[in-house]
Image (cartoon, rainbow, N blue to C red):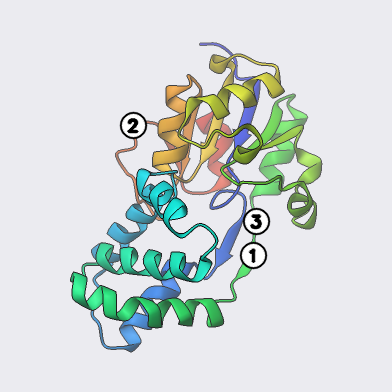
Amino acid sequence: MTRLRAVLFDLDGTLRHHLPTGGEVFVQYLKARNIHITHEEELRAERWEHFYFAYSLEIQTDRDRFKTDTKSFWINFSQRRLTALGLDKKQATELAPEISAYMGSSYKPEVYIPEEAPMVLTQLKDSGHILGVVSNRDERFDEELKDLRLDSYFDFTLAAGEVNSFKPDPLIFEHALKLAGVTANEAAYVGDNYFADIVGSHRAGLTPVLFDPKQLFPDAGCAIIRSFDELPNSLK
């Protein structure tokens, strides 16, 4: 097996998190309205959300449809999420504007990084690994990494909008490999989104590692970690 020289990371949902998550607050609001949601329905909706934001055809269609109409985009997203949670089309259509407005005005999450992440990043950097962050963001996020006090760990960053290639498209990973100066079989990619991160990095020939604290994708077909301190062993 070729020795891994580079470890690349996703940003949102992997290095950077919201507490509580939008999905959790969304469901809490429904339960306060006496709408019963089972645990399995919550998990199903979370899997759908991962799929949607993996540059799916649905989100591409919605972005083109709503363009600069952000309010309508999020109402439509709320309707899609309600449907994923098991509500019928009529109920989802009626509730979507209300719950979208609530999320827009009341959802103020705390941003945090996993507490084990700095220690593990230090360990990887000290062992000589090239480290990078590859995100589906439209624009560069270097200042945000500085605010999170993570910038010193990474040799480079890459936003999908810079190269007009969004995960799971292999092209974004190929750009990242050039920045790292390694071949695909010398690199691992760590991310939380099965559809974007695991499928995409696997297609590009990298070694995928799924960060999955909630066990959303137990059959991912790759190394799975639930916390960052499990990462070094998964790379051996």
At label 2, counting other C-alpha atoms closer than 10 Å, the crowd grade (few under 14, some 14-19, many 20 or more) is few
In the rendered image, is residue 213 in sight?
no
Residue at the spot 52% in from the left edge and 37% down from the top edge: 166
Tell me the element at label 3. Answer: loop
C-alpha distance separating marks 1 and 3: 12 Å
Between circles 1 and 3, the one closer to the viewer is 1
Residue 128 found in image quarter: top right
Q: In this view, does 15 lie above or below 34?
A: above
Q: Mark 2 points at which residue?
A: 221
Between circles 2 and 1, the one closer to the viewer is 1
Residue at the spot 36% in from the left edge and 44% down from the top edge: 57
Contact, mark 1 vs mark 3 (Cβ under 8 Å): no
C-alpha distance separating marks 3 and 2: 27 Å
Q: Position of residue 145 (x, y in %)?
A: 74, 50
C-alpha distance separating marks 2 and 1: 30 Å
Q: Position of residue 122 (x, y in %)?
A: 74, 39
Q: Check disc 1 and give the amino acid type.
A: Val
Q: Mark 3 points at which residue?
A: 115
Tell me the element at label 2. Answer: loop
Q: In this view, does 143 lie above or below 160?
A: below
Residue 179 located left or right of residue 9 = right
Q: Check disc 3 and give the amino acid type.
A: Glu
Contact, mark 3 vs mark 2 (Cβ under 8 Å): no
Q: Name the residue under label 1.
A: 111
Residue 125 located left or right of residue 90 = right
Q: Check disc 2 and give the amino acid type.
A: Gly
Q: Which of marks 2 and 1 is nearer the N terminus?
A: 1
At label 3, counting other C-alpha atoms closer than 10 Å, the crowd grade (few under 14, some 14-19, many 20 or more) is few
User: Which residue is at the front of the view, 220 or 177?
Assistant: 177
